[in-house]
Image (tube, rainbow, N blue to C red):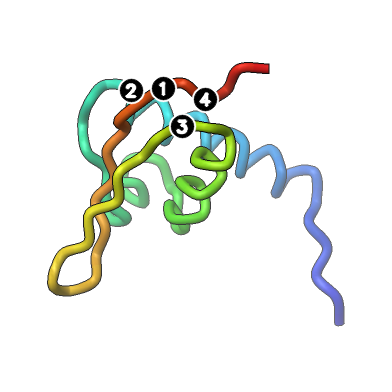
Amino acid sequence: MTFQRTGEDVKRQLRQKDLVLEHLKTGAPLTQDMSRELYGCRHVASRISELKKDGHIILSLRNDQGCSTYLLLSDEGGRE
């Protein structure tokens, strides 16, 4: 059985990425638990990776339990 991403999957990922970016632009930190609770985003690390590939500079701080907190350092990405 092969998994195929549907158009709805792609739309959801793009919407989540936009929500995560807008949150980080406020200067507030974001954690996995916060992203799940606020935006229904279960895999925030994937959205952060996509934002980094777009050129945004995001700091990832990991605590002793292995949970990351993300902060936007520069919003230079997204220029096309």
- As helix, strand or loop, the secondary structure at mark 1 comes to loop
The residue drawn where x is 62% and y is 36% is 14
- As helix, strand or loop, the secondary structure at mark 2 comes to helix
**Rendered image: mark on residue 75:** 1
| First in residue order: circle 2 vs circle 1 | 2
Marks 3 & 1, CB-CB < 8 Å contact: yes
Q: Nearer the viewer, residue 2 or 48?
A: 48
Alpha-carbon distance for marks 2 and 4?
A: 12 Å
Q: Nearer the viewer, residue 45 or 36?
A: 45
Residue 52 x %, y %: 50, 41
Q: Determine whether 14 is above or below 37 in the image.
A: above
Alpha-carbon distance for marks 3 and 1?
A: 5 Å
| First in residue order: circle 2 vs circle 3 | 2
| First in residue order: circle 2 vs circle 4 | 2
Marks 1 & 4, CB-CB < 8 Å contact: yes
Q: What is the quadrant of the N terminus in the image?
A: bottom right
What residue would you read off at disc 2?
25
Q: Residues within 10 Å of mark 2 (few under 14, many from 20)?
A: some
Residue 54 x %, y %: 58, 34
- Say left or right for 54 vs 52: right
The residue drawn where x is 44% and y is 55% is 45
What residue would you read off at disc 4?
77
**Rendered image: mark on residue 56:** 3
